[in-house]
Image: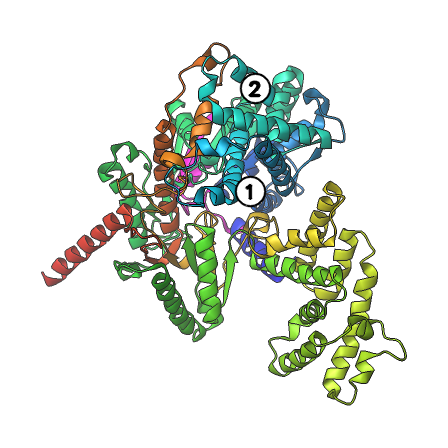
Amino acid sequence: MTTEARGTANRQSAQAIAFRPRPSQQAVLDYRGGRMGVLAVPGSGKTHTLAALAARLVQEEIADEQEVLIVTLVNSAVENFKLRINHLLARGERHLLPGFGYRVRTLHGLAHDIVRERPGLVGLSEDFGIIDERQASAVHRDAVESWLRANPDMAAAYLSPDLEGNQAEWIERNRWPALVADVAAAYVKRAKDLQLTPEVLLSRLAQHTEGHRLALARMCSEIYADYQRSLAYRGVVDFDDLIRLGLDALERDADYLARLQQRWPYVLEDEAQDSSRLQQEILGRLSRASGNWVRVGDPNQAIYQTFTTADPKLLIQFVEEGSEGTLRTLPESGRSQPAIIDLANQLIDWVRESHPREGMREALSPPHIEPTRPGDPQPNPPAEPGGIRIVNRELTPQQELQSVTESLARWLGDQEALPERDRQTCAVLVPRNQRGTEIVQFLRNLDVPYIELLRSTNITRRTAGALGNLLRALADPTSAKKLDTAFRVWRRGDRDQDEEADRIKRAARRIRGCPAVEAYLWPRADHDWLAQLDSELAADERDLLEAFRPVAQRWHRAAALPTDQLVLTLAADLFQEPSELALAHKLALLLRDVAETHPAYRLTELVEELGVIARNERRFLGFDVEDTGFEPPRGVVTVATMHKAKGLEWDRVYLMSVNNYNFPSGLAHDQYLSERWFVRGQLNLEAEALAQLQALTGPPPTYRSAIPEPGEATLEARKDYIAERLRLLYVGITRARRELYMTWNTGRRREKLQPAVPLIALLDYLEGQQEKGSEAHDQ
C-alpha cells in the first residue's frame, strides 16, 4: 500500500470510529425492515449512514448463515464500505470478525457471484471467462470493420449533402467508422439491458412490415450478431452479458433464487440514482421474499445516463410508489460554506421555476441542501460570500486557460507560504477530457504542481510511456536514437538533479551518435565503440555508459521471453514504487492478452497498445479514483472531469468552459456534442438507432409499433442531455467547500459560443444578493 493509500485508509478509519449520527441519519438507522428510499444531498454522509445501518443489521437482525448485501457503483466504494463496516463490527457488542455477515459488491461483482455459482443455468461452461473493456472494444471494432467492408454504401445515406470537395470521402474514411462503432456500442448495450439477443432482433427485423425504415437497427443488429459470435468463439462474456445472465439465472431457477433470498435477507443499494433497469430487476427479485430493500441516492447527481443504461427515473418511481413513511431524507451537509450551499439551492429553484424550456423544469428536484446545526461533528466552513466568483468576460479558449492557470499559480504561491497542515485543496473541473489535457499543459508550462483524473492517471501514462519506449528500442535493436531514449528512461529518476541531468544529456548524445549499436552493446576486441571513445570521454560519462551497457544487454536477452515476462523484467529495472510495479503487472497482462488474441502481432504492434494508453487516448483501469479511492492532496492542483469529481470535494474549485456547448438549454443557438456536424440534418444517430431498437421491443405484435420519424429521437435526446448537463453543473458546484470560480469561453468555431443560460441566471442571482447586502449595509 502506498503512503497516500495508507493515509486515506487511516482517515477513513478515524471517521468510521468517530461517526455520530445526526437526527436525519438516525432516522435511517432506525430502519427495521421493508422498502425504504433515502434521498441524500451532496456531502450528507450517506456512506457513513449506510455502512452504519449495515453494521447494525449484521449485529442484530441476521442469522449466522446470512449476509447483508450492499450494492454500490465502483470498486473504490466497495473497499470504503468494507473498511467502515469492519470497524463498526469490531466495536459492536458481538465483536464480529472482519467480513462476517455482509457482502459488498458492484453490480458486475454481484452478477458474477450469481452466474459463477450456477453457470450451467445460463448455458455457460464451468470455466467461462469474462472479457474486459479493452478486449471487448477490440472485438467490437473488428465486427464494425467487417460490417463496413460488406456495406460500403451505408455512409451516403447519412452524410450531409453540404460537404465540400473531398470532404465526404475524408469523412467516410476517417470519421464514419468511429461513429458507426459508437452507435453500435450504445445499441448493443441497450439491447442487452432489454434482454434482447441479436437472433431475436434480426428475426423481428425480417418480419417487420416497415423494415426499410429501420436501417440503423439492422446495421447495429448485424454488428451485434457478429460481436456475440466472436465472444462465443472465445468462450467469454462481456460485462453487460454478465448482468443480463445474472438476471436470467434468477428467472430460470426458482429454488436457486429462493436460496439467494434466504442468504441475503436485506439488500442495501448505494448510488441508486445510477441504477439501470437490469440492476433494479436483479435487486427487486432478490429482495422480493423479505421486502427488505433500502435504496439510497440523489437524482440531482444522476450524471451517467448519456454514457450508460442508468435511468434516474427508476429511483424517483421507487420513492413515489412507496407507502407512507418509507421515504427518508439526508438534507444536511457540512461540506460547503453557506454561500455555496445557497448557490446550489438557487440552481435547483431556477431550474424548477424559470428554465426557458418548461420540459426541463423537472431536471433538478428537492430536497434542498441544509447547513449543519450547531454542535454537528462536521460543521460547515465559515460563511464567505466573496468566495464565489463568476467571470463574466468573453474569453477565447486560450484566454480562459491563461486566466485560470495564472490564478492557480498565485494560489499556489500563497499556499507555499503556509505550514503544511494549513494548506488547502484545489481542483480544476472540466466538462470533457480534452479540455483537461489542455489545462494540464498550461500548468506544466508554469511549473504548477498537479495531479489529474482524466482518462487515465498521470502515473498510468508515465508507466506505460516508459515501458513503451524500452520496447520500441528492443523492436528496433540497431536504432541508436531509440537506444538513446531507452537510456534516458533508465535514468529518469535523476533528471531533476541539475548535475546529474547534465551528465545524462552528455551521455545520451554520445549514444545517439553511435554509428553501430552492436559495437557498443556487444563489443568485440577489435570493434569496441566505447573503447574507441575513451580519450574523448569524461570519467563520469564513461562510468554512466559502462553502467548502462549490461542493463541494455539484459533487456535484449529478455526480448526472447513471452511478452508479459519481458515487461516484468523491464519493470524490475525501472520502477521502485509499489504502485508503478503493480501497474506494470497490469500492463504485462494486457499485452499478454493482446498477443494471445493476435498471434501474428510483432513487438511493434504490441508497443502501440501501450502508446494508446500513454497518449491518453483510451481509458485504462490503473490505480486511480475508481480503483483505490482518492484523497485530494493539499497545496497541489487536481485536474478532473466533472464526472470523475463526483464523490470528491476540494476547498477551492474552478469550473471551466461553462458555455452553451457544454451546457445547452434547448435554445436556437445551442449546439450538441452528440450531433456530428457532418451528419445529414444534424441527426443524433445514436439516439435514432436506440429509438429504432425500441420499436422492436416487446412480444408480437407490439414490436410493430410506430417507428419514430427521423429527427424525433434526436429532439428527445436533446432533452435528456440538457437535463443531465444541469445535474452535472450541480455536481460541479457542490464539490467546492470554501471558494468557487466559474468561467466560460467562446469556443473555436466561427460562430461564437455564449455563456450557459444557467450560468447567467446564477450570475444575476449573485449580483442581486450583493445589491441586497449593500443596501442592508447602508441602512
Q: Is 36 one of the magenta-colored residues? A: yes
- Residue 578 to residue 229: above or below: below
Residue beneath the point at 72% across and 22% down: 120
Residue type, mark 1 in image: Val
In this picture, which residue range is highlighted in magenta? Answer: 17-46
Left or right position of 425 against 104: left
The residue tagged 1 is 74
Q: Nearer the viewer, mark 1 or mark 2?
A: 2
Name the quadrant of the C terminus. Answer: bottom left
Give the class, few, some or many, for how many residues have Cα within 10 Å of label 2's Cα (few <14, many ≥20): some
The residue tagged 2 is 202
Residue 180 point in image, percent of width and height: 51, 36
Residue beneath the point at 41% across and 41% down: 678
Which residue reaches farthest top?
Answer: 701
Left or right position of 77 against 732: right
Please tell me in which quadrant of the rendered image residue 535 appears.
Answer: bottom right
Which residue reaches farthest bottom?
Answer: 535
Name the quadrant of the N terminus. Answer: bottom right
**N-terminal of the two: label 1 or label 2?**
1
